[in-house]
Amino acid sequence: MFSHVMLGVSDLARSQKFYDALLGTLGLGPGFANKNRFFYRSPTGTFAISTPINGEPACHGNGSTVGFAMQSVEQCDAFHAAGVANGGTTCEDPPGFREGPTGSIYLAYLRDPDGNKICGLFRPAK
């Protein structure tokens, strides 16, 4: 459904360090630069960070979340730990299982250095 997700950031170098570490836990290499942006490509889509091209300050979307699919609880935990170790902050509840109408899922929420809400999500086989 999606080709890419791009988030606005205020400090490209700081955010590149954060996302290189965070997305490295998913097996993605460091982002590659294109002007004022960094791109992270996977077989299923592209994630990017950019300073706003209109010159206005970057800001996070209240109520917005970017979720990344995880292969295991351990990968979720590594994703969260890498984010926190590289300038992110934990938010919501601590990483763990949540029960909902579609079953049990493991969620690990954090905010990037600019306040964008990021989530690692693992859905175990039923």
Image (cartoon, rainbow, N blue to C red):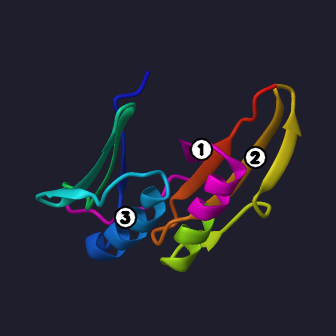
Q: Tell whether 55 sits left or right of 116.
A: left
SS of the residue under disc 3: helix
First along the sequence among labels 1 and 2: 1
Residue assigned mark 1:
70
**Residue 14 percent across, percent down from the top left:** 34, 76
Q: Is residue 3 above or below residue 10?
A: above
**Residue 99 percent across, percent down from the top left:** 88, 39
Q: Amino acid at mark 1?
A: Met
Q: Amino acid at mark 2?
A: Tyr
Residue assigned mark 3:
20
First along the sequence among labels 1 and 3: 3
First along the sequence among labels 3 and 2: 3
Q: Is residue 12 above or below residue 116?
A: below
Do labels 1 and 2 touch, CB within 8 Å?
yes
Numbered mark located on residue 106 in the image: 2
**Residue 116 percent across, percent down from the top left:** 51, 59
Do labels 3 and 2 touch, CB within 8 Å?
no
- Name the residue nearer the viewer: 119 or 31: 31
- Name the residue nearer the viewer: 83 or 30: 30
Q: Quadrant of residue 100?
A: top right
Q: Residue at x 27, y 58 (%)?
A: 31
Q: Amino acid at mark 3?
A: Asp
Q: Whole-Å distance between the Cαs marked 1 and 3? A: 16 Å
> Which span is picked out in magenta?
55-79
Do labels 1 and 3 touch, CB within 8 Å?
no
SS of the residue under disc 2: strand
Q: Is residue 1 magenta?
A: no
Q: Residue at x 47, y 62 (%)?
A: 22
Q: Tell whether 8 sits left or right of 66.
A: left
Residue at the left extreme? 35
